Image (cartoon, rainbow, N blue to C red):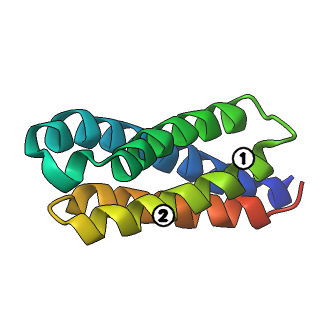
């Protein structure tokens, strides 16, 4: 079953990207942003960071459980990660979060476009 090997590798990479993004967004929001204040804790930005962390966690779980819905969850995850990257970049000082979000968004876009 060589045709499933690339899918399995990309699945593992996507799960890893989601888990990493979940961790970085949560840590950045609850540590850096809360301490920095100002634009970092404005409702729209702060909520987006928490939503990003949550959808990344959910996306990883859907993939780990081999859910038939994981492609759709990955699509939503990609959209939220992309928005979070833009928001973090606009405010500044969150390069690690921007990078994690972009990597996760791209990985989830690829996963969302794959067929079973």
Q: To which quarter of the image does residue 32 belong?
A: top left
**In screen coordinates, is 79 left or right of 32?**
right
Q: Please tell me whether mark 2 or mark 1 is closer to you in this view.
A: 2
In this rendering, the count of numbered labels is 2
Percent across and percent down for residue 20 are 40, 43
How far apart are the alpha carbons under marks 2 and 1? 16 Å
| For marks 2 and 1 on the same chain, the one whose residue lies earlier in the sequence | 1
Q: Quadrant of residue 95?
A: bottom left
Regarding residue 26, the answer to whether it shows in the image is yes
- In the rendered image, residue 65, in percent from the top left (x then y), is placed at 74, 28
Tell me: residue 110, above or below residue 48: below
Q: Is residue 35 left or right of residue 105?
A: left
Q: Which residue is mark 2?
A: 83
Between 80 and 61, the residue placed more toward the observer is: 80
Q: Badge 2: few (under 14), some or many (20 or more) residues near its Cα, within 10 Å? A: many
The vertical placement of 17 against 59, above or below, is below
> In the rendered image, which residue does mark 1 sit on?
73
Q: Nearer the viewer, residue 36 or 10?
A: 36
């Amino acid at each position: 079953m060589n045709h499933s090997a690339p899918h399995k590798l990309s699945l593992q990479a996507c799960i890893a990207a989601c888990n990493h993004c979940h961790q970085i967004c949560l840590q950045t929001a609850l540590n850096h942003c809360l301490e920095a204040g100002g634009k970092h804790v404005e409702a729209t930005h702060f909520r987006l960071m928490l939503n990003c962390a949550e959808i990344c966690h959910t996306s990883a779980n859907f993939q780990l459980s081999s859910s038939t819905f994981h492609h759709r969850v990955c699509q939503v995850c990609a959209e939220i990660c992309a928005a979070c990257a833009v928001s973090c970049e606009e405010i500044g000082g969150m390069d690690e979060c921007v990078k994690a979000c972009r990597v996760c968004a791209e990985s989830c876009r690829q996963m969302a476009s794959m067929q079973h």
